[in-house]
Image: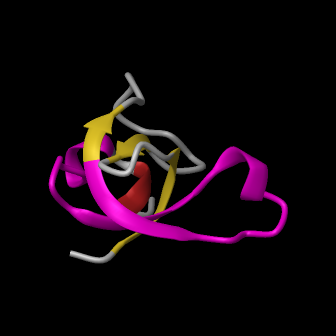
Amino acid sequence: MSEHTVRKNIKPGMQVEIVEKQNQRSGKLTAGEVQTILTPGQIHPRGIKVRLTSGQVGRVQRIIK
């Protein structure tokens, strides 16, 4: 299980890279700061869904720290 697929590893204020829904095929990542965690469950195989402070929404692919 990867670090970015477990909800407890992601906290508001962390720097992460997300993939937005429209970029899933290309794999283009967007970096930013987590504002809100949107995934209700504790684990998600494709990454925890978050909203960044910029307003963008996507699944975490990498935690920058």
Q: Tell me if residue 37 comes above or below residue 14 in the rendering.
A: above
Which of the image's four quarters has the C terminus? bottom left
Q: How many marks?
A: 0
**What's the image's color scheme?**
secondary structure
Q: Nearer the viewer, residue 41 or 61?
A: 61
The range drawn in magenta is 7-34
Task: Decide if residue 52 is on the left or right side of residue 35.
Answer: right
Residue at horizontal 28 percent and vertical 51 percent from the top: 34
The quarter holding residue 42 reads: top left
Q: Can you give x and y, in whole percent of width and height, for residue 32 in the image? A: 35, 64
Task: Decide if residue 7 is on the left or right side of residue 44.
Answer: left
Looking at the image, which residue sits at the far bottom? Answer: 64
Residue at horizontal 23 percent and vertical 54 percent from the top: 9
- Judge whether residue 2 is colored magenta: no
Looking at the image, which residue sits at the far right? Answer: 25
The quarter holding residue 16 reads: bottom left
Residue at horizontal 81 percent and vertical 69 percent from the top: 26
Residue at horizontal 25 percent and vertical 43 percent from the top: 35
Q: Can you give x and y, in whole percent of width and height, for residue 1 in the image? A: 45, 59
Looking at the image, which residue sits at the far top? Answer: 40
Q: Tell me if residue 19 comes above or below residue 49 in the rendering.
A: below
Q: Tell me if residue 57 comes above or below residue 39 in the rendering.
A: below
